[in-house]
Amino acid sequence: MGKYNAKNESSDKFSLRGRVFHKIRDDILSGKYKDNEELKEVAIGEELGVSRTPVREAFRQLELEGLIHIIPNKGAYVTGITVKDVKDIYMMRSLLEGLCAKWATENITPEQLEEMEENVYLAEFHAAKGHTPQIAELDNRFHEIMYEACNSKMLEKQLRDFHDYVLRVRKKTLSENKRSTESNKEHKFILEAIKSGDPLKAEAEANKHIISAYENMVKNGLHEAYATDED
Amino acid sequence: MGKYNAKNESSDKFSLRGRVFHKIRDDILSGKYKDNEELKEVAIGEELGVSRTPVREAFRQLELEGLIHIIPNKGAYVTGITVKDVKDIYMMRSLLEGLCAKWATENITPEQLEEMEENVYLAEFHAAKGHTPQIAELDNRFHEIMYEACNSKMLEKQLRDFHDYVLRVRKKTLSENKRSTESNKEHKFILEAIKSGDPLKAEAEANKHIISAYENMVKNGLHEAYATDED
DNA sequence: CTCCGCATTATTGTATACAATTATACGGAG
DNA sequence: CTCCGTATAATTGTATACAATAATGCGGAG
């Protein structure tokens, strides 16, 4: 369904480089590495049982993702991620998901529309039954469909990046409370707007959806997960 | 003035890896490498007189930037950039520059505000005299100031990425016609809104500014520079 | 002639070796 | 005791060597 192979690029969880990349990334996002801590190639290589080569390649990617910054001939230092960073990403994402919904309204295919309807319908069912993992999966998939439907490679990539970025935070919060039913109701609003061919309505609904997802998250203890705040 | 060293990360134009990275990137954006063309590590290494190591590291970064995609154990293939991609980026950037202007209104320091006023004033002077390079530099700087003033590391990074991405396109179009005076007028509008503490006005003006920059660009022959379009 | 299978080649993935740069420690001058 | 310079060590940058995987081509069976 997606234009190229699968999900995000560099999702190569099986190559050494991919494993190193994801490992360090998780360790930064989970707070194992503190802000401004220096990452040494050999140390991490030994810890994971690999040589410096894959570690270095992973470093280069992490730098581009903004999670570390590299000073040439000197070292790699973690940039970390604060509570404010997460908030800012949600605000940026809100705008772009709105744009995505707008474009999706104008470009969605019948097949995508059908999958979206099915998605919302199924989510309603699982929400009633309290099937947490299915709900999370459907929630992800709803947004994926929109990303594909907007017909913009650039926007799709950007939103996937954001989505990946906040995924681990969201995973903890969505579920286990009744946010899931609310969330799905908002999905339904977006879907209705798309179906009725109202791009501006779709945009506004998608905007609201992300904002309320964020607000729900802060209510449910974002601060505990990310204690490295600074403001 | 920026929080960390200088401009964008990986701007290490002098290391081998940095040179390879920028070279390939330019070659893709300038159209030297066609869509879906395979990039071979040894070939590029030999062309630039370096070994495979820096080439591979550059590849990993280019993949994350979305300019190539790597199939494990197979090869690296250029993704290219179409006219539609450029348009989409401008639309995304329009929204985020708006957000940036909004936040800048609420967070700008007196020093930044002063530099902004000076910038607009100077640009007016150079525009009248037709000093093209100074105008381009001031235009860049105006946006840089806003990025710094919005007080969001994440948004700043994102906008810098976008800005870098479209820079070579913009460089050709801005200048040489009277867009520069128009552009500076729009900068002035944004500045006025920020000064008067009206975030929504600033947002709207910044939105319009990017859109009109884009519209000007298409009028002045974007299509010739990017003949690899597909729609 | 076509298609399958195996050997060969090419290409990427990883590890290691060497070079260049930067940090550290030690010793002497003042 | 402090400061400076130099020698040493630690760390990153690059090149090369080796391993694993995928593409290519050839030859024979049918």
Image (spheres, coloured by chain):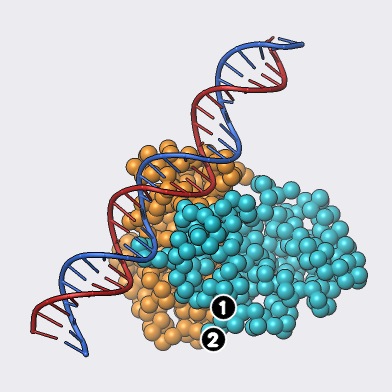
Chain colours: A cyan, B orange, C red, D blue
Say which residue appears at 41% left-offset and 50% top-offset.
Answer: B54
Which callout, 1 or 2, points at the residue further toward the start of the chain? 1
Q: CA distance from mark 1 to mark 2?
A: 9 Å
Question: What is the crowding at mark 2: few (fewer than 14 residues within 10 Å), some, or many (at least 20)?
Answer: few
Instruction: Tell me the chain of label 2.
Output: A
Q: Is residue A21 above or below residue A217?
A: above
Q: Tag 2, which secondary structure?
A: loop
Q: Residue at x 91, y 71 (%)?
A: A128
Q: Residue at x 57, y 65 (%)?
A: A25
Q: Amino acid at mark 1?
A: Thr
- Where is mark 2, residue-wise? A231
| Relative image position of residue A105 (x, y in whole percent) | 74, 59
Q: Given contact means CB atoms under 8 Å apart, are the residues at marks 1 and 2 in contact? A: yes
- Badge 1 is on which residue? A82
Total numbered labels? 2
Q: Residue C27 location, x and y as percent?
A: 17, 75
